[in-house]
Every structure is written in C-alpha cells, then in structure tokens.
Image (cartoon, rainbow, N blue to C red):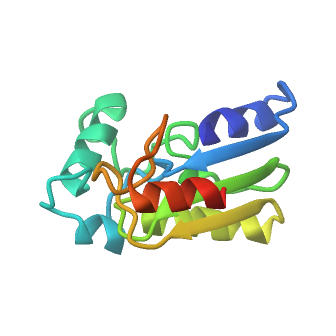
Amino acid sequence: MAAVTLMARDRNGLAILAQLLLSPMLHDRNDSPSAQQTRGLGIWDSSSNKTGWHAPLGDGIRGGPDVSSYAAPSRAANLSGLPSTFVDVGSAETFRDEDVAYANRMWQAGVTKLRASPRWVRGTGGGFKPGRPRGSRSCALTRSR
C-alpha cells in the first residue's frame, strides 16, 4: 500500500484518502536492530525478510543503491503530500525499527498516526489475526483500534 500511495502521488493518479499500514515491509536493507534481534527465532525473522526482498529484487539489487522507492518505500526522499496514514507495528517484530523510522519521517510531513503494540509479534498466534481474534492480546489490540 505504501508504494502504491507514493506512485499515485508522484504520477498524479487517483487521490488516495488514507492508508492503513499493518506491519508494512518497507526497508530492503534488512539491517535495523529489530531485524537483527529476530534472527533465528523461527518467525518472520531477518532470514525470511532477506528472502522476501530477494524475490522481487533479485541478485545483487537488495540493499544496493538502485532500489526504487516504489519497491522499498523507505527509500523515498520525499514523504510530503501523502494522505493520513496509520502505521501499526509490533514492538517485538522484525519490521519495528524500519516502520517507526518511516512513521517518524511521515510525522515530519504531518501525515502519520503510529501505534506500536507491546509484545506483539507477527506469526505467533498471540498477535492480531484477521477474522475473529481469540487470544487476549489479539482481542485487546482489536478493541483498541
């Protein structure tokens, strides 16, 4: 969604009213502290993240200077003119630091709301799941939205 919104703004496309970014994958470098902290945990960790970026970008591109902001939105130099954005990321998640950094840059442009959920980890059954949540943390997160 972040890349589509950037592209719509840059190409004078459809006027997107808002975006909801739930644990967005924004940064191809895979070098943040949160990415390193999740290494080898068996969830969507830095190894999975590397594979996830390698698939669309290919050999020798991920992390390099030629990655487009439409592939990795954190690479966008200008975040002004984007619609109101809600960024939700777990505090113990691989994407935590890149999502918070992106949200901080968006705050500077006046467009973001951020929620960092304590102890929430993607892919662990204790975090938000689409559909009917059953865990206490899932229910609390759903109620707070």
Residue 1 to residue 113: above or below = above
User: Residue 79 placed where, x, y %?
Assistant: 74, 55
Q: Is residue 42 left or right of residue 3?
A: left
Number of numbered discs visible in the structure rendering: 0
User: Residue 137 placed where, x, y %?
Assistant: 43, 62
- Locate the N terminus and report the quarter of the image it occupies: top right
> Which residue corresponds to the image point at 80% horizontal and 59% vertical from the top-left?
111
Q: In this view, does 138 lie to the left or right of 116?
A: left
> Which residue corresponds to the image point at 18% horizontal and 63% vertical from the top-left?
39
User: Residue 90 placed where, x, y %?
Assistant: 45, 63
Name the one closer to the observer, 28 or 121. Answer: 121
User: Residue 16 placed where, x, y %?
Assistant: 82, 34
User: To which quarter of the image does residue 17 belong?
Assistant: top right
Q: As drawn, which residue projects farthest toward the top?
A: 14
Q: Is residue 58 left or right of residue 75?
A: left
- Locate the C terminus and report the quarter of the image it occupies: bottom right
> Which residue corresponds to the image point at 43% horizontal and 71% vertical from the top-left?
91
User: To which quarter of the image does residue 54 belong?
Assistant: top left
Name the one closer to the observer, 133 or 72. Answer: 133
